Image: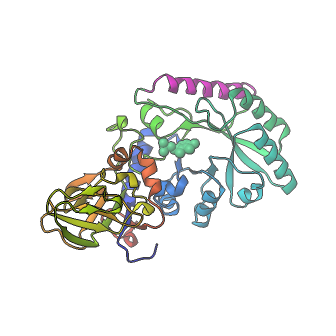
Amino acid sequence: MNTNRPTFARIDLAALEHNYRQIRSRVGPDVKIMAVVKADAYGHGAVPVASVLERLGADSFGVAFCEEGIQLREGGITRPILVLGGIYFGEAAKAHKYGLTPVIASVKAAHDLNYDAERLGLKFKVHLKVDTGMNRIGLTPEEAMPLSLSIVKEMPRLELEGVISHFATVTPDLGDAYWKQLTAFREAVSWMSARGIEPPLRHIANSSACLAAPRPPFNVVRPGILLYGAMPDPSFEGMLDIKPIMSFTTEIFHLKRTPPDSPISYGGTYTTKRPSVIATLPVGYADGLPRVLSNRGHALVRGIKVPIVGNVCMDMTIIDVTDVPNVSLGDQVVFIGAQNGASITAWEMAHACGTIPYEIFCGINHRVSRIYTYGTQAPEQMP
Ligand SMILES: *Cc1c(COP(=O)(O)O)cnc(C)c1O
């Protein structure tokens, strides 16, 4: 957003590049990487992120629905784009126009798309979604197997390019749920293979499976959160050298001294315990700083960790900076990121909110200006 308000999400594209290369070396050269860039690349900006990844050799991209794919095409992305959530009835022409590959998650979706394709005189590559234990979307293996056969035999407008499944639970030691899902997927793929159906792209592994599996299963992986520099779960910490890529910062807008017993913000849920220095910041829950951080969250000022006091407001948040020497108007305030050797990670903020970094990143919305850097270089010096 074009504004002088100094509330920023800074995205370090050099760190993104580092994370991509780490994933590439983890999975080896023979496995294709489908970079998951749904939800505006988890809030990092789908087009800038996908452009860097395409240049680095990412094989394809995963989005949630058609418009996310269209946004990538309009931003110049040329590699294959898989619509992970499938397309809606009536979207066939649009999906085709923008070269989007639909996931087929039900028998009806296959028939609908084949019907539309015939009517429009178009052909589609599709990936068949097999539900192996997530119980969200997808065909049961019992439905997927015969459907693969009827796609090949009776739906000439559809080309079965891929089969896809999705893990519900992966732990660093893999665990029973992982093996159960993997086995179900393997059986479905073998069933097809035995009948001469060989979809060239087979994929099930998200970030956690990329980390935990000794070798990535099948020939495509679909990492999301690892690209953005957070572990899918704290239990994976240390399993791959990835770097945070987003920092979320603002500046002190208003500074005042308050006597003891001053109530702060709506409802006065905090009252000062001592003569205090209170700073007001131009960022609030409407920007994606969760209101649940009221009296719970922290920020960095001059490298010192200070508490959020009182309720986070829609556009403003108040912190207690009494313990920060020489605190001044315009000082940078960090909610996620590093400052003077101190740092707050996305996981730390997520823990304080009872959520996961995925939700924190996605929540930082378009009100917040994005700044793209390449390490310490300005973006125009990007290679
Ligand atoms: C979001 C998503 C991913 C990526 O998950 P991460 O945990 O971020 O790696 C992969 N596959 C599907 C189907 C998804 O919806």
Residue nearest the observer in this picture, 270 or 286: 270
Q: Is residue 157 above or below residue 248?
A: above
User: Where's residue 150, x and y in %?
Assistant: 81, 34
Q: Is residue 348 left or right of residue 217?
A: left
Residue 204 painted magenta: no
Q: Residue furthest right?
A: 119
Task: In the rendered view, tell whether residue 366 sits above or below residue 106.
Answer: below
Q: Quadrant of residue 92?
A: bottom right
Q: Please, what is the dominant secondary structure of the magenta stretch?
A: helix
Q: Which residue is depicted at the point 28% across and 52% down?
A: 344
Q: Position of residue 323 (x, y in %)?
A: 14, 59
Task: Using the rendered image of the protein, determine whether residue 318 is visible from the camera's viewpoint.
Answer: yes
The quarter of the picture where the C terminus appears is: bottom left
> Which residues lie in the magenta part?
174-196
357 relative to 46 in the view: left or right = left
Q: Which of the 4 image quadrants contains residue 291?
A: bottom left
Left/right of residue 383 with respect to residue 296 in the rendered view: right
Q: Is residue 25 left or right of residue 321?
A: right
Where residue 231 sits in the image (x, y, percent)? 39, 42
Q: Nearer the viewer, residue 2 or 49?
A: 2
